[in-house]
Image (tube, rainbow, N blue to C red):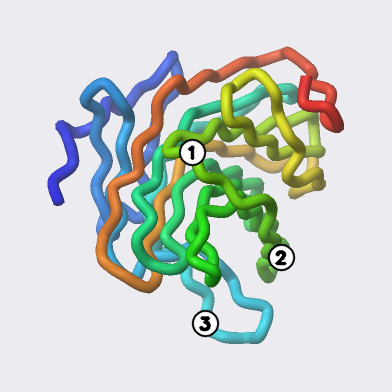
Amino acid sequence: MNAPSAVSHHFDGKEIRFQNEESGTAGSDGTLTIEAKSRTNYFVNPDNEPAQLNAPFLEFDVPDQIFTLQARVRTPLRSIYDAGGLIVRVGTSWAKLVVELSPFEKPTIVSVVTKETSDDSNGEEVADDWIFLRLHRNHGVYAFHWSLDGKVWKLARYFGLGLPDEQVCMGMIAQAPMGGPILVEFDEIKLVPGVTLDVRNGS
């Protein structure tokens, strides 16, 4: 599986960093792509198993106190826990919103919030190839939303993360914990500073 040409180090005025580069590749050829190698994951199991934090992801700094990252995501789900989506990191805490293949072998909206260990929550099952995902920051409070059409948004998670003075980073992530490598596509990416959303109804 070959990813397109290497992604630019800047996007919409933001400097992008590629984290865990040894675990995958990133590229851009009309759509942004992240290829995750086999046995890659981003999860801190609360049962005291060793943390798995080797999934590849692209991220940028978010100094804005109110900020939204939105993208349409296509994830070729073949093996359980294959996933692609959005990630936010604040200090040593982090959270992700992904489309993931559940143990029932269904594409599922999954959110994970990690403060020392990961709090994992499966949401609704989805059938569309492309799913819109959205990450919203309002100071120290965050919200995850998802949508089939980019117009009607459903709340997946509402949570606090990190301390007020800690650096906030957002971006896109891919993982393939159990099976072969996957290539996740991202398009219709939007970075929107300064616009407050209604967390409950997604507007």
Label 1 amino acid?
Answer: Asp
- Kindly identify the amino acid type of the residue bearing the numbered disc 3: Pro
Q: Is residue 51 above or below residue 158?
A: below
Q: Residue 178: image x %, image y %?
A: 37, 73
Residue at figure coordinates x 65%, y 57% from the top left: 112
The residues tagged by marks 2 and 3 sit, at their Cα atoms, a distance apart of: 15 Å
Q: Quadrant of residue 152?
A: top right
**Does 81 appear above or below 109?**
below
Tell me how far mark 3 sits from mark 1, CA to CA. Answer: 34 Å
**Which residue is pictured at 40% across the width and 51% down the height?**
174
Q: Can you tell which mark lies on residue 119?
A: 2
Residue sitting nearer the eye, 200 or 173: 200
Do the CB atoms of the residues marked 2 and 3 lie less than 8 Å apart? no
Question: Which sits earlier in the primary sequence, circle 2 or circle 3?
Answer: 3
Image position, residue 139 (x, y; %):
79, 31
In front of the other: 4 or 10: 4
Is the residue under label 1 in contact with that under label 3 (CB below 8 Å)? no
Q: Which residue is mark 3?
A: 50
Question: Which mark is first along the chain, 1 or 3?
Answer: 3
Above or below, 86 relative to 66: below
Q: Residue at x 45, y 20 (%)?
A: 188
Q: Amino acid at mark 2?
A: Asp
Residue picked out by circle 1: 128
User: Tag 3: Cα neighbours inside 10 Å, few (<14), some, or many (≥20)?
Assistant: few
Q: Quadrant for residue 28, please give it.
A: top left
